[in-house]
Image (tube, rainbow, N blue to C red):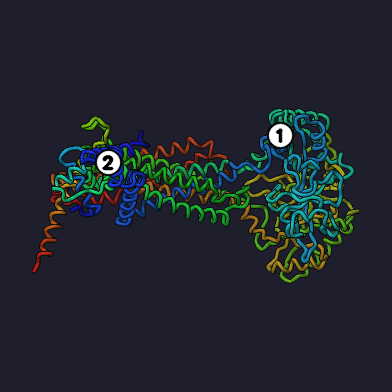
Amino acid sequence: MSENDVRDELEFHVRMLAEENMRKGMSAEEARRAALDAFGALNTIEEQCRENRRGAALESFLADAKHGLRLVRRTPSFSFTVIATLAIAIAACATMFSVVDAVLLQPIGYPAPEKLLAIFESWREGQQHGAFSAPNFLDVQQQSRTLSSVAAFYTTSWNLAGRETEAIRGIAATQDLFRVLGVPPAYGRSFADGERNVVVISYALATRQFGDAAAAVNRALILDGKPRTVIGVMPRGFRFPNDETQVWTSANFGADVNSQRGAHYLGVLGRVAPNATAEQASRELAVIGARLTKAYPDTNDGETFIAERLDAARVRDVRRGLLILLAAVIVLAIIAAANLANLLLTRVAARAREWAVRNSLGASRFRVMRQFLTESLVLGILGGACALLLTAAGLRLLTRFGPDDIPRIAEASMNGRVVLLTIAASLLMSVFFGLVPALAVSPDRPISGSPAATRFRALMVMTQLALAVTLLCGASLLIRSFLHVLHVDPGFDPRNVLTFEVSLPSTYDGIARVNAFHDALLERLRATPGIEVAGVISQLPLSGGRFGSSFRINGIEKDEWHASVYVADEGYFRAMRIPFVRGRRFDGHERANGERVLLVSSSAAKKFWPDSDPIGAQIRFGASGGYERYEGRIIGIVADVHQQGQEEEIEPTFYVPLRQAGLDFATYVVRSQSDPQALISAVRAVDPNIVAAHINTMDQQLADSLARRRFQLFLLTFFAGAALLLAALGVYGVIAYSVTQRTKEIGIRVALGSSVAGVFRMVLGDAVRMILPAIVAGIAAAAALRSITAALLFRVSPTDPSSLTSVAIVVAAVSLLAACIPAKRAASIDPTVAMRFE
Amino acid sequence: MPTDLLQGTLDLLILKALALEPMHGWGIAVRIQQLSKDALQVQQGSLYPAVYRLEAKGLIKSEWDTSENNRKAKYYSLTRAGRKQLDAELENWKRFSTAMRLVLEAR
């Protein structure tokens, strides 16, 4: 109908014209032709009509939009407040969402991630997610029916020859690694078990060395002094297990692998078979674990095997913290939204007259609502545009200053999802703000003065306050936790300590050659001016590495325990200022063919020798083929070190002397005021094919270990502070408005003899009646959420009374202060002025 | 003698024509001619785009009905906004033409 109605209408007119022409004496044909001539081109006119019908709608929308923009300019401080609040709230949410999306929501880049499992050895008294030993892994691989492929891996380090020797991190893995992950090399092939001198390299390394990834296959790289053939190149962007890994080689467990059941250093992944589920695989792993415990009680007692989805395992530590931060930022946005709604309601009341005039001029209710919506949309779009800019800036700040150790945080970016969310949020909010006043406006209903409206506003402010209190409780608890962590003595003195890694190629075969290198380098370092002390350790504290072994004490045959085992020289303890407790230190004269000795940490001494003296005890480590030579007699006790960081439990630890171990990968520790360049030169002087890698200060590494906690703390405190500010503004707004509404009443009271102080007390009393219950509600909510927050805290109870009390006091003070300002104004109301007040 | 009408004046004439009673497009054209005692003859085609524009602005509204010779026709009438606009425009026009006369007849 509407398609032809224009035509029908025009036709009617033409026919009327034609009839008139016929009455003048023309024939029907002539009449029609004359009529059409007089009328004009039917098609063009029809087109014009349709356009006008459509266009006017757009025109009036544009007029509204222009009017909205003018309004924004005319009330700059109001507009600025709204736009800024919108922009900040939306940007905060979008930034946080971007992080959560990148870290938790986006699927990891492996096919069928629900079937990709990370498998751990889990100890009843010890680590829940511990590394595997090679024989355990081989048994799992052989015995599992539910896993179609299983692979194990450990980290390696290489010196890549080139114009400058470069240190490269790599992974040595069993042949199924890429099959388990589901990502084959983009070019070439993967290695088979036992293939020596072949490497699979990363896309980045291939393009860097050979210009083109495809051209890299069958070329050679000189790693650790020997040429290795590149047999495969991984696809661009492939990272396993992290960004730094550039080289994948075939794992070498050694000929005597079966005697290493107690040596745990492998990561294990498995892919669930197509006809099985992850739960079935988990159950089967537990069964295999039980079977091995029975078969090898020496090494496997008290443990089982557990499996977790790889994507879940990677974010296990950060998931809860991130979600709490996301919840916090959403709470902040809600508080901001409540403020904005109040602001707009107030403004609508101020413009009541304008609406009345427009109404009387014939603007329909719909038109008025449409104008409100357009004005809000203008504010919303401006706010959204600013939010986009702020989000981009926020993400850049985050990636620069945020913690590095949140997996995939670098992937948080202004991608399509984030941009869409920002735009959607700003449009949604502006529609909300357009509707709230639009619905409140009606020619007959008085706005904002009604008791219902007042109650609504008071309720909103109380909700804001309560939410702010909850956030502040969280922030306060986190602050306390952080302070506790800072107070934990790491066990060493990180100031002025430089560290670097060296990795000895296989040309250093035999313990004599390895020791010769270490002796030469240590001598050179100690001779360097500025270097006070130099030492060596197999795993630097806070490096994330952990090396554990089962052991037996001679004379106590029935019990076997676990401890960490590290290789160190006497210089290490001196350089790190680790206190010596009792007995004899390493003196540098321990030799491979001499008596084997050990140092033990004081917690290990207390744990395993609660009633006797460990010094003199003979220890055998539970796995051989590289471990059994670590056996020895305990000669001394050293103080504990927080090897995994100040928040983690101290591990009972043994130290093996450097020259009895044959350490081909080591971290050097140097107490020095000198330039790191001196370290590089020293290493190069001993062997130009080896490079001092990953030079860092111990101070920096200690700070980095706290980076995640510091990040959470900073964000939550920031959100909580902003929330308190907004809530205080809300309190101010509501009390100020109520004072304005009650100006006449107050004037009457004063005229009837109420004192200034009395008025002040009355207004403040109203405020207190709002503030107190809100604070109580907020604290109750914080207490109710204790099971959620507990995981983030360190040595603080989630209902720590002093934290909660201090929050209550701060919030009460701030909000009472906010209420004092209008209260004071109320107290100084001149009754004569008040009476005339409209 | 029919003169070319400016867009604004055409709108005003349409509104005035409808002020007396609702009419279809043809009737509006006839009435304008009648009321001006034949001095103004609307360009037939240009009437309709103007009418559609006025409707889109909410100054007139339309309704299909049967015409006097039993045909379906679209009838237009003034809205409240249209009536207000007409009154305002008439005021303006009177003031304008007075001013013009003063200027043009000045010695």
**Residue A267 shown left or right of residue A457 in the figure:** right
State which quadrant residue A104 falls in: top right
In 3D space, how far apart are the residues under numbered discs 1 and 2 (Cα atoms)?
Answer: 96 Å
Q: Are there few (<14), some (14-19), or many (20+) residues within 10 Å of tag 2?
A: many
> At 32% across and 49% down in the image, what residue appears?
A64
What type is the residue that disc 1 sits on? Ile
Residue A525's spot in the image, x, y percent? 77, 66
**Residue A405 shown left or right of residue A383 in the figure:** right
Question: Disc 2 designates what residue?
Answer: A31
Q: Are marks 1 and 2 on the same chain?
A: yes
Local secondary structure at mark 2: helix
Question: Disc 1 designates what residue?
Answer: A306
Q: Are there few (<14), some (14-19), or many (20+) residues within 10 Å of tag 1?
A: many
What type is the residue that disc 2 sits on? Ala
Q: Nearer the viewer, residue A547 or A589?
A: A547
Q: Chain of mark 2?
A: A
Mark 1–mark 2 contact, CB under 8 Å?
no
**Residue A373 shown left or right of residue A549 in the figure:** left
Residue B8's spot in the image, x, y percent? 23, 52
Local secondary structure at mark 1: strand
> At 83% across and 65% down in the image, what residue appears?
A687
